[in-house]
Image: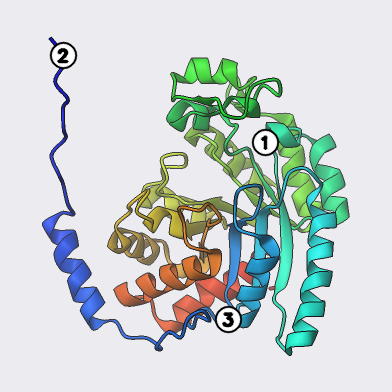
Amino acid sequence: MSTPILIPPVTGPSLERFQMSYRKRRAYRDAIQFPPALSGVANAIDVHCHAHEGQQDAFALAKFASTCGMGGLLYKTLPFAKPPMPQLNALKDQLHRWADDEDVKPIECWAGFVTDTWNGRPTRAAVEPQLKAGIKAIWMPTASHANSLHLSGGREIWWDPQASSKVILEPMPFDIALARSGGMYFLKDGKLDPEVKEIVRLCAEYDAALFFGHFTHPEQDALVEEIDRVKFKKAAVDHPFSLYVDLDIARMQQFARAGITVNFTYDELSPLMGVDPHAMYQAIRATGTDWVTLSSDCGEPLFPNSVEGIRMIVAYMKAYGLTEAEIEQVTVTNPRRLVGRG
């Protein structure tokens, strides 16, 4: 006898979310959109966008962002086959030539560097040459961290260069994830890895931002302690609602009190993660806007492009209650601080 197929019940939003969404969408009005150019993103700086292999094209995105009047893009990723800064410099040259021809003001562009396994892990040897070259932000490990492998699995090639790029591992117990990832966890006997401490110092020395990546809570706490010890004020934690990061409001407030930016993303609001925009607004309101930014985290084909991602997260937060002055703070003023333009 064949096993019956279990079909889960169809579920929709809670009644509260459903009713709130209609109140907000009926009340919210903004400038009429004239695609392909977008309004509502003037001067905004996206401090978290992706343009590596299989993602949106970096140059096309920069042109679109310029056409729409954005302030800048911090590329967390560019194609991994080459170091990011030569790619960024070539992109900027190309963008400025195009902008001169089209009589458009070009956006500013910056590059980040992720300390995942394929980039040499979070070590001084891997990071300092990138900072010397001009990188403006360092990310602690993300997809190759044991926490990511534990919660969502990942491509085996991230840990084993001999593996097929098509092999995608399923989520697994943390101890197995720790072994499979080659020890991508940065506490030992409750103390932060000395190499990570060195990266904090290097970011302070080179005036570069430092993002927490997918650190677990104990690693986050140890990193916060080190950041506070050296009085570093250009650290940020991405997508706090993501289970990789998993911050409740009390924890967001703790980060903000320590001078660490809480970076909310369109990724969280997308259908893939499905965070209630009202919950995001309430978290921002409770945390305060002094240490908050809005970004896209877009790039994958299942997301809109980063300009549209910024437009959407801004529109949601305005609809739910952020003022024009607060939007300016979280999309222009605070991002400029992170990229060294504050």
Drawn side of residue 227 relative to residue 18, left or right: right
Q: Residue at x 47, y 51 (%)?
A: 239
* Marks 3 and 2 in Cβ contact (< 8 Å): no
Closer to us: mark 3 or mark 2? Answer: 2
Q: Residue at x 71, y 85 (%)?
A: 105
Amino acid at circle 1: Asp
Check disc 2: other Cα within 10 Å, few if <14, some if 14-19, many if 20+.
few
- The percent position of residue 195, horizontal first and vertical second, equals 75, 33
| Numbered disc 3: secondary structure | loop
Tell me which numbered mark, 2 or 1, is placed earlier along the sequence: 2
* Marks 2 and 1 in Cβ contact (< 8 Å): no
Q: Which residue is mark 3?
A: 68
Check disc 1: other Cα within 10 Å, few if <14, some if 14-19, many if 20+.
many
Amino acid at circle 2: Ser
Q: From the image, which quarter does the C terminus lie in?
A: bottom right
Q: CA distance from mark 2 to mark 1?
A: 44 Å
Residue 260 position by quadrant:
bottom right
Closer to us: mark 2 or mark 1? Answer: 2
Closer to us: mark 1 or mark 3? Answer: 3
| Residue closest to the far top | 1
Tell me which numbered mark, 1 or 3, is placed earlier along the sequence: 3
